[in-house]
Image: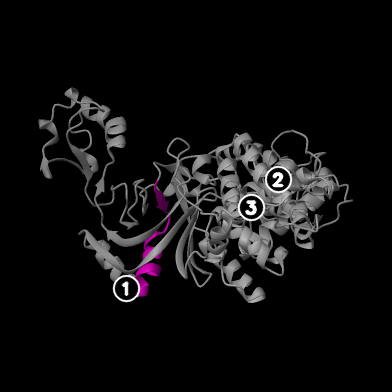
Amino acid sequence: MNTVRSTFAAIFLAAVTGILPFTASAQTTQTTAETAEVVLSPLQQAIKSELKTQISSTPSKFAKKRIAAISDYYEQNGFSSLWLKDNQVSDRAAAIVRSIERAEEHALYPADYAVTALQQAPDPADTSALAAYEIRLARSLVAFAQHLNAGRVSPKTVTRENVIYPEAIAAEKILQDATSTSNVVAYLRLLAPHTPRYERLRLALASYRSLAQQGGWEQIAEGEVLKPGMEDDRVPALRKRLAVTGDYIGDTTNPSIVYDGDIVDAVMAFQKRHGLEIDGVIGRNTLKEINMTIEERIAMMEYNLERRRWMQDDYGRYYVFANLADQVLKVVKDEKTLHAELIQVGLPYHRTPVFTDEMEYIEINPYWNVPKSIAVNELLPKLRQNANALSSQNFEVLRGGKVIPAYGVPWGNYSKVNFPVRLRQKPGTKNALGRIKFMFPNNFNVYIHDTPSKSKFDKASRFFSHGCLRLKDPLKMAEVLLGEQGWNRAKIDATVASKKRKVVKLEKKIPVHIAYMTAWVNKDGSVHFRRDVYGRDKILGKALKKVQS
């Protein structure tokens, strides 16, 4: 997935060195290394021995795979040193160590790459120590570069709901490039995402870390729900707290305990940044978000930088992007938002997965083919009590592709394991999919569609669906997407009014990116956070603690 990012780094390498990306050079070395007449120097022999020892002593499957790839590269190059010159740490190696020392700029940790050991130059007279340093630096470099390029952990190993597959640059390629470039620091930086989205969050993380060093912010005491116009002794402390994050820009020395004016505006700004009800009322949810510690916010930013590394830099010239944590969908063209709207996403027990696919067609006045899980778990109990229980909602029963009467089915004889029919809801105002659906066929039976449950869009938290993305204004989205191929709103409305099912194939498939971002920074510099409703931050945090280089 991150091949574009890796290719960009390769282009940079060629530009600054005139060296083509790694192809046949190692092949020639391999032939030399395998020639029986070659005699290894003491350092080469020590490097070979150190590699063998580290492969056998590394318990982690991923770390073992990494060291094995490093060993292959060294073998191809006759076990010659890459980072030592006259038994001293080379300038190139020192530059790599300096980059690792600054790993926290990317929410990576120098300690994960044995930076303390790398900062201690080995004894030039101790061959074993030189070999150990050589391989330690190679391992740290490759791990650091791969983590920059595609994340510290594979998303699919964190949770099966992450259905994205970033591919980090290969260890052999990293070693070849890092020994060829004239600017290894710049080369490493180019392996990380080079997008405004990533960079804005990275800089905001640095700002929040600076705030943490200054003491962060104080907690606001519990108390009764605070509404505009009320008096409360907590108001002065509230001014100071919201000034730290830039929501309040007034006088922090104001002793007034009246909750009104600019402090109410500051709370509303805070609520907007955190996806809360924007009413200026400080209830349980708003106070909880205000009292999240700066350390917790920093952790959220780090998790989301990791997620950014999983994602491709280029979403496409024209695409749909949905953030599940924010419950907002956007249609973007040339990095300008053409349409944005609120969505409803999967309930916590019907969590919508993270994945990318392509929208292929739009269906107006669709049927709803009820998934078997919903049919047997939610509708079958109703049909057992009354065979016609669903007829008023325009459901029909199909067997072998043919519609059959519901009253003729012995519903009491069926269960989850032997359900022989299919349930379908006909087009109409009661249809669960509403008037239109946007199809990007996938293995999860997830798509974007209208819904008759419009009142639920009034909620700040909109986790209501079985996993699909429900739109508040689907006809507007159809107008935007189909406008690319000559449709206008009048034509869409007329097709809907016909009540006849119509499938409109898109002339060009549109990428659909479904993500889960609980922290990000907008173009205006505002830092946004969302509740981790699916618990994915917590799961990711545990996975990151197990990373080995």
- Residue 437: name its quadrant: bottom left
440 up-or-down from 393: above or below: below
Q: Indicate yes or no whether the magenta region holds residue 44.
A: no
Q: Are marks 1 and 2 in contact (CB under 8 Å)?
A: no
Q: Residue 113: give x, y in percent of width and height.
A: 71, 46
On residue 548, the disc is none
Residue appearing at x 30%, y 56% in the figure: 435
Residue appearing at x 25%, y 52% in the figure: 428
Q: Are marks 1 and 3 in contact (CB under 8 Å)?
A: no
On residue 487, the disc is 1
For label 1, the SS is loop
**Amino acid at dot 1:** Trp
* Residue numbers of the magenta segment: 468-484
**Amino acid at dot 3:** Val
Q: Residue 112: give x, y in percent of width and height.
A: 70, 43
Between 262 and 119, the one nearer to me in the picture:
119
Q: Residue 224: give x, y in percent of width and height.
A: 71, 34
Q: Nearer the viewer, mark 1 or mark 2?
A: 2
On residue 142, the disc is 3
Q: Which residue is mark 2?
A: 46
